[in-house]
Image: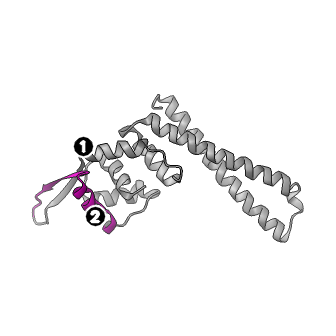
């Protein structure tokens, strides 16, 4: 995912200036996607050149004019395309942005993407649990190198459990609201 898609989601929620987008990123989207003020302005310029955003210049008394960005028709089309596009390599950040933006595209396509990722993580979790059962039948007796290997494996198990649980939560909520 490019920063452009996170910005398209944010601007779809509410138009804003580059400064306002920076503040929003610090308080919400920035919890899982970080972008500097300079990055946001560079990307906004590229998005304007690509026709994905429109700019309204608002005169301000005693200060430079403010540019307020809104998503254009081409930007909405790009967001819809990206939301529906399968991305096998997407991580939690990309998926979180897709979930947040689902309402601006096809929620069914986003739910299908979540199902694919859930299956991949559930499969990995099963492999890790098989390794745990096969290689570490008595974890309380472990020490040294074997203990350290086990602890790393447990970390992987915990990560995959968390991913699968989150995907289940998302899918249940989307199903409950009939969004997907």
Lower position in the chain sequence, tag 1 or tag 2: 2
Q: Reply above or below: 9 against 26.
A: above
Name the image quarter holding the N terminus: bottom left
In the rendered structure, which segment of residues is drawn in magenta? 38-61
In the image, is residue 83 part of the stretch drawn in magenta? no
Q: Which mark is residue 86?
A: none
Report if residue 67 is visible in the image.
Answer: yes
How many neighbours does mark 2 have within 10 angstroms: few (below 14), some (14-19), or many (20 or more)? some
Q: Secondary structure at mark 2?
A: helix
Q: Quadrant of residue 122?
A: top right
Which of discs 1 and 2 lies nearer the camera? The answer is 1
Is 6 positioned to the left or the right of 48 in the image? right
Q: Toward the viewer: 95 or 87?
A: 87
Give the distance between the C-alpha atoms of the residues marked 1 and 2, in whole angstroms: 20 Å
Q: Which residue is mark 1?
A: 73
Counting from the top left corner in percent of width and height, residue 42 is at 29, 65
- Are the two marked residues, 1 and 2, in contact with CB atoms closer than 8 angstroms? no
Report if residue 13 is visible in the image.
Answer: no
Q: Which residue is mark 2?
A: 41
In the image, is residue 51 part of the stretch drawn in magenta? yes
Counting from the top left corner in percent of width and height, residue 157 is at 70, 53
Residue at x 18% of width, y 58% of height: 67
Q: Toward the viewer: 16 or 106?
A: 106
Is 179 positioned to the left or the right of 145 in the image? left
């Amino acid at each position: 995912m490019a920063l452009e898609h996170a910005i398209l989601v944010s601007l779809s929620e509410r138009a804003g200036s580059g400064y306002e987008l920076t503040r929003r990123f610090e308080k919400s989207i920035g919890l899982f996607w970080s972008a500097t003020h300079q990055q946001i302005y560079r990307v906004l310029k590229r998005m304007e050149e690509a026709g994905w955003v429109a700019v309204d210049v608002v005169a301000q008394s005693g200060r430079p004019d403010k540019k307020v960005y809104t998503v254009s028709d081409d930007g909405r089309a790009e967001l819809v395309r990206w939301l529906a596009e399968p991305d096998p390599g997407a991580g939690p950040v990309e998926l979180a942005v897709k979930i947040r933006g689902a309402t601006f595209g096809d929620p069914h396509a986003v739910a299908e993407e979540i199902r694919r990722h859930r299956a991949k993580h559930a499969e990995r979790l099963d492999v890790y649990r098989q390794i745990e059962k096969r290689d570490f039948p008595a974890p309380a007796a472990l020490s040294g190198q074997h203990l350290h290997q086990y602890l790393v494996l447990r970390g992987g198990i915990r990560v995959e459990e968390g991913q699968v649980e989150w995907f289940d939560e998302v899918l249940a909520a989307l199903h409950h609201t009939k969004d997907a």
